[in-house]
Image: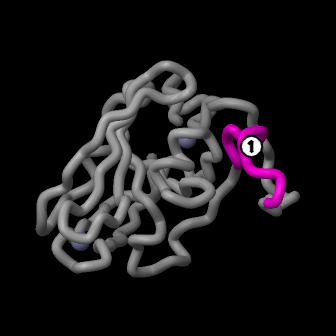
Amino acid sequence: MREKMDFNGACACGAINYQCSEAPLAMFNCHCGQCQLASGGTFVSAALVKESALSITSGNVKYFRSVGDAGRWTDRGFCENCGTPMFAKGEIAPGLISIKPGTLHDKTVFKPSIDTWASSAPAWLHLDGALPKAHKTPNLLNNKTSTKVG
Ligand SMILES: [Zn+2]
Ligand SMILES: [Zn+2]
């Protein structure tokens, strides 16, 4: 069973607040082209949780759909008011949602275990040599389910 854990977060303007009642199933940094665009920077960090464990306690999340390098859609959620990227849901992982850890009130909740699409990272980015590197999107949930994320 999943570890019981409560954590929460908010966007920059404070309109959107969320609460999550379970520990993340997987935590990773994704360097794919769509994540670079969605972050507006270099990569997206994500904590994957069950959608049923996440409650939006205030505000409305706006979603933008993009088709990723693997040909599947991802809906990326952000605050309409301040633009903070907050969540992502993918065709590849039904019932799951990822949380952007920059929105966490307790930043120590996020501990990435892998870099995905690492070969798409810019040459100047120094990646943590201690983390495994995946080309494309591996199965991050191991034997728990057959679901992949990305
Ligand atoms: Zn906001
Ligand atoms: Zn990505």
Secondary structure beneath dot 1 equals helix
- The residue at the far right in this view is 129
Which residue is rendered at x = 50% and y = 48% of the image? 37
Task: Name the colour scheme.
Answer: one colour
In terms of image quadrants, where is residue 51?
top left
In terms of image quadrants, where is residue 118?
top right
The segment highlighted magenta reads 115-124
- Asked if residue 89 is positioned above or below residue 110 in the image, the reply reads above
The image shows residue 146 at horizontal and vertical percentages of 52, 23
- The residue at the far top in this view is 71
Q: What residue type is labelled 1?
A: Ala
Instruction: Tell how many labels.
Output: 1
The image shows residue 134 at horizontal and vertical percentages of 75, 37
- Asked if residue 9 is positioned above or below residue 124 in the image, the reply reads below
Q: Is residue 102 left or right of residue 77?
A: right
Q: In this view, does 54 lie to the left or right of 47?
A: left
The image shows residue 23 at horizontal and vertical percentages of 44, 59
In terms of image quadrants, where is residue 5?
bottom left
The residue carrying mark 1 is 118
